[in-house]
């Protein structure tokens, strides 16, 4: 079941688009105009009412070329940043870019093991949001690479 887009405060919507590379170029009355290099039309966000209606959010997403998935990814990232929550990730089956697409900073294996086993408070989330077949293939490749590395030593 996919998430539902709901009205959000205009300030939060501005932060979402800023996280996607847009910047405020001007304000005129209750209209905030944002642009991004490579996007032909500017985004227009109204500051009144305080909560932006779903139709306006979707219109700006379409103008920005933003998918629903990307919107929710940035929404989660912006909310985490507001509360000062830092997200770190390590997975031998994912590339650095794939981890950073989730809004997490990547950790090296040596750092992550020390981080996980330290006595500092942390929250470890291991939800399985992946394609099982692709994960098995990557795991096989990873194990093969690790095995050949150990043979060289």
Image (cartoon, helix red, strand yellow):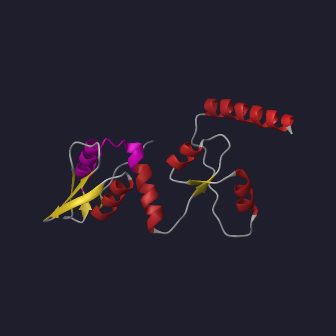
The magenta stretch is: 53-71
Residue 28: give x, y in percent of width and height.
14, 63
Query: Which quarter of the rendered picture does the N terminus lie within?
Result: top left
Membership of 15 in magenta stretch: no
Which residue occupies 64% across, 58% down? 124
* Figure quadrant of residue 135: top right
Q: Is residue 131 above or below residue 36?
A: above
Would residue 26 be found to the left or right of residue 10 on screen?
left
**Front in this rendered view, residue 109 or 102:** 109
Would residue 104 be found to the left or right of residue 116 on screen?
left
* Figure quadrant of residue 47: bottom left
Secondary structure mostly seen in magenta is: helix
Residue 84: give x, y in percent of width and height.
50, 69
* Figure quadrant of residue 141: top right
Does residue 75 appear anywhere in the picture? Answer: yes
Residue at the farthest left position: 29
Which residue occupies 19% across, 61% down? 26
Would residue 99 be found to the left or right of residue 19 on screen?
right
**Front in this rendered view, residue 132 or 81:** 81
Q: Is residue 62 above or below residue 78?
A: above
Membership of 59 in magenta stretch: yes
Would residue 73 be found to the left or right of residue 23 on screen?
right
Q: Is residue 153 above or below residue 34?
A: above
Query: Which quarter of the rendered picture does the C terminus lie within?
Result: top right
**Front in this rendered view, residue 58 or 28:** 28
**Front in this rendered view, residue 137 or 146:** 146
Residue 143: give x, y in percent of width and height.
76, 35
Residue 80: give x, y in percent of width and height.
48, 62
Does residue 3 appear anywhere in the picture? Answer: no
């Amino acid at each position: 079941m996919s998430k539902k887009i709901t009205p959000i405060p205009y300030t939060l919507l501005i932060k979402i688009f800023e996280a996607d590379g847009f910047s405020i170029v001007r304000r005129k009355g209750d209209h905030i105009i944002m642009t991004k290099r490579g996007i032909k039309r500017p985004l227009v966000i109204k500051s009144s009412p305080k909560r932006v209606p779903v139709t306006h959010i979707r219109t700006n997403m379409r103008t920005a070329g933003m998918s629903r998935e990307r919107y929710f990814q940035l929404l989660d990232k912006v909310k985490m940043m507001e509360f000062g929550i830092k997200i770190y990730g390590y997975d031998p089956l994912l590339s650095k870019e794939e981890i950073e697409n989730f809004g997490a900073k990547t950790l090296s294996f040596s750092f992550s093991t020390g981080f996980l086993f330290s006595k500092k408070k942390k929250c470890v989330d291991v939800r399985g949001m992946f394609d099982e077949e692709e994960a098995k293939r990557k795991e096989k490749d990873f194990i093969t690479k690790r095995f050949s590395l150990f043979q060289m030593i």
